Amino acid sequence: MTAGNASIGNDRIRIDIAPDDGGRVAQITVEEIALLVALADAHEQSPLAWGSYPMVPWAGRIRHGRFRFDGEGYELPINFGAHAIHGVGFGTPWTVTRHDPDLIELEVALPSDARWPFGGTARQRIGVDGSSVRFELAAFAGERAMPASLGWHPWFRKPERLGFRPEAMYRRDDEHIAVDELVDVPPGPWDDCFVNEAPVELRIDGVDLRLQSGCRDWVVYDMPAHATCIEPQSAPPDAFNIRPNRVAPGEQLTVWFEIGVVTKR
């Protein structure tokens, strides 16, 4: 981890945060058990491939980086194959605005250039309370309205068990992007977005976890042998084309995500 990292927690849970590395959680440790893929263990040295990072001001892919908003066309830089993926927050240093033993708050100014022409601000709040960790992520519009879709991208070390009971799945097209059509959930492995309102259960090295969020759309990527990504999002991938959300000047979009430690063997 880089200089300037911060930690919060209690006698059971420790959260290591790397503000300079995209404001991400570098590691979650429960009684000496590491839950996330660390940078040193990532299978590629990419900011997309380790820890748990905020996806802001969009989550998942935007098809070819193109969308229309308030009657105008926009084109974002391509950073993953032929598409723009996971926003700009994961690659930008964040500023710590509050740091208590069990709570940290971070903030970043969103760009007003080709990477993201709308400006605005993003804020995170991460807190440990007993046996749970709560994440809050918000995007604030500045002087002009902007679209927004928010979420988290945790790289969990490969779980021994995954309890996931989604209601439906967004069909994925030939460009590997979700479209606005729900289908039955097929057997895994997956790299897909699902409609899910039930807790998600994981067991990692004997630690039982329960994941919950106010988000209804969840991406699960469990194809790698070393990790499983479980990503609550405020909208499906390509949200600016499928389900645009307009944040008016001075307003905000806020989402939350909780990881609860149920038991440890």
Image: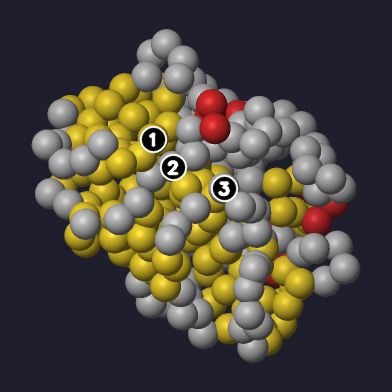
Mark 3 residue type = His
Residue corresponding to mark 2: 36
Q: Residue furthest bottom?
A: 184
- Element under disc 1: strand
Q: Does residue 159 lie above or below 88 as drawn?
A: below
* Precedes in sequence: disc 1 or disc 2: 1
Which residue occupies the foreground of this view, 146 or 254? 254
Mark 3: few, some, or many residues within 10 Å (few <14, many ≥20)? some
Q: Residue at x 41, y 77 (%)?
A: 197
- Dot in front, 3 or 2: 3
What mark, if any, has residue 223 been given in the picture? none
Q: Is residue 121 above or below residue 202?
A: above
Residue that label 1 marks: 27
Q: Earlier in the sequence, mark 3 or mark 2?
A: 2
Identify the disc placed on residue 226: 3
Determine contact: label 1, label 2, CB under 8 Å: yes
* In the displayed structure image, the side of residue 236 where residue 203 appears, left or right: left
**How far across and how far down the image is residue 195, in percent?**
54, 77
Residue 62 place in picture, x, y as percent:
74, 54
Where the C terminus falls, by quadrant? bottom left
Corner quadrant of residue 253: bottom left
